[in-house]
Image (cartoon, grey):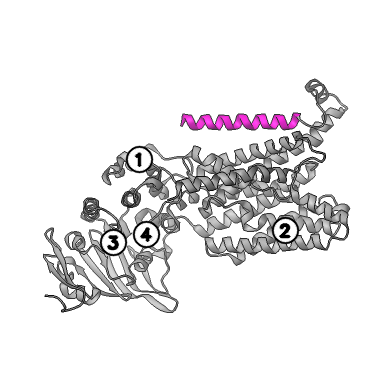
Amino acid sequence: MTRLAADRVTVRRGGKAIVDAVSLALEGGQFVALIGPNGAGKSTLLSALAGLLAPESGTVSLDGVPLARIERRALARSRAYLPQGPRAEWPVSVERLVALGLTPRLPAFGGLPDAMRKRVAEVLAQVDLAAHRDQPVTTLSGGELARAMLARALVGDPAVLLADEPLAGLDPRHALGSVARLRGLADQGKLVVAAIHELPLAARYATHVAALHQGRLVAFGPTARTLTAALLRSVFDVDARVAAAGTPAATVDFTSPVAGECE
Amino acid sequence: MVRRRGWLALGLALLLAATLLSLAIGRVWLDPRVLLASAFAPEPSLAWLILSEVRAPRTVLALVSGATLGLAGAALQGLLRNPLAEPGLLGVSAGASLGAVLAIYFGFSTAFALATPVCGIAGAFVAAAITLTVGRGGTLTMILAGAAVSGVMGAGLSLALNLAPSPYAAYEITTWLLGSVADRDWQAILLAAPFIAVGWLCLLLTARDLDVLTLGEAQAESLGADLARTRLLALAGTAMAVGAATAVTGAIGFIGLLAPHLVRPFVGHQPSRVLLPAALFGAILLVLCDVASRFIPTALELKLGVLTSLAGTPFFFWLVLRLRRTSP
């Protein structure tokens, strides 16, 4: 079982602690929704968990080994990272873009082996982009590009997926499809950590919720116990009704932005 | 795949044709039969000497520097993900020019024939070292450091022209700055060759990381790319290859910018696949420009650098128009 652990991770920028002494122990089989208001430190924490950002203090370790001691390509094979609002810099084809996710597995020279080509086609079909295979990625819509990037992250079959707002910009059908796919990965025993603002989707599909507020981890646990109206109120400053969190029937309704003004 | 092979075959055919043209065309017509006969004769004929000592080095130099500019342009455009990147961007060309000009200015070049290329290569290394030390740590800082280094080196060039000891020295400096592959001897080319070869190797080693950079820096790093290493390879490769080539030819613009753009649509825009075709088309373009410079009837022979700039500018306009059409 994959284990990803953060031990008192602190990241400072300009003297301010963006991520403040966060300790987290995650393992395969969990789909962790990382929630928190803008500027809470979600993206920074995800970068640190991905090993792309060396924390000021504290360590992140994968299966007990500090990330700094894992060879780049080995780390790239076991964890995938998807930043917020990823962009493609050149008008390569959708197929080519997704195939870039296999880079850490490619032989030193030569093109894409046939087995990998098949894997790319499979993942493209999963995100509903098979028909766009040869289209230049720069001509995709925002939501289509987001799905192509998700396919890029999934194509290498990583044990750990860290995704920063993978649902942003998706229409309801594809948002549901994507979040269900993330949950499916967790059910297969993989670890998925995703920053998510779509709280109703988090309430339904995430197995665990981690809440950040001003760089500190204020709550972490199974969705049913953690995602409560009290938490949303203290983290987001909104009143909400939360029902059946952690089940497919979960609902999150926001009732008012400032405590006690409505109703 | 078949289409790709077709383009490659076309490119190679063009390269061969351009090379033959460059060897055949000049002030005098060389009869192939005379050449063939003298190739096996103990005493070289005049025709053979013209071919081996004048046209062959000129052609080889045009091929090699054209390929270098195309390759470096493709690598830098891939690294910086900027279609306007070109080898001169990092201050290397200006450094090589300043080194060579100082050799002319202080009269080293009259005392010792190889002084110009040697000082040119030294200048390129100094410029690259400054760019690398100051601009370490990021792509944007590297571009800015390169611009600053270019500025300093350009100021040095102006200063040398300003203080030139005699009108003749000033004339010699300006002529050198215009860029040309004419009248260079084998010695200068052989001096530059090892640096160019190592530079090519460094640039080609960036290929895979250039591909993942299509996804931006964060995803590229998450896929195992070592961007600090890639930046170092691209800069060192450009410094060595373009620096050494510029030290022999003088500044030649636009080839490094143009060649990658010409081939990009034919290789599916994948940065690693742009590298070698860009080198191929850089070589073709520069040889053809050099041939054209001999054709065009002017009192003084047109300098190659002037011609590439003249021919390159319309392309720039085309690039702007295309960007205006495709960007929202």
- Report, in whole angstroms, how far the alpha carbon at label 2 lies from the one at label 4: 41 Å
Q: Is residue A111 left or right of residue B125?
A: left
Label of residue B123 in the image:
2
The residue type indicated by label 2 comes to Gly
Write down the residue under mark 3. A194
Distance of label 3 from label 4 (alpha carbons): 10 Å
The subunit carrying tag 2 is B
- Disc 1 versus disc 4: distance between alpha carbons? 22 Å
Q: Which is in the foreground here, disc 2 or disc 1?
A: 1
Q: Position of residue A145 (x, y in %)?
A: 35, 50
Label 3 – label 2 distance at C-alpha: 50 Å
Q: Nearer the viewer, mark 3 or mark 1?
A: 1
The image's mark for residue A234 is none
Q: Which residue is mark 4?
A: A83
Residues behind callouts 3 and 4 on a single chain = yes
Q: Position of residue B31 (x, y in %)?
A: 80, 23
Of marks 3 and 4, which one's residue comes earlier in the chain?
A: 4
Label 4 chain ID: A
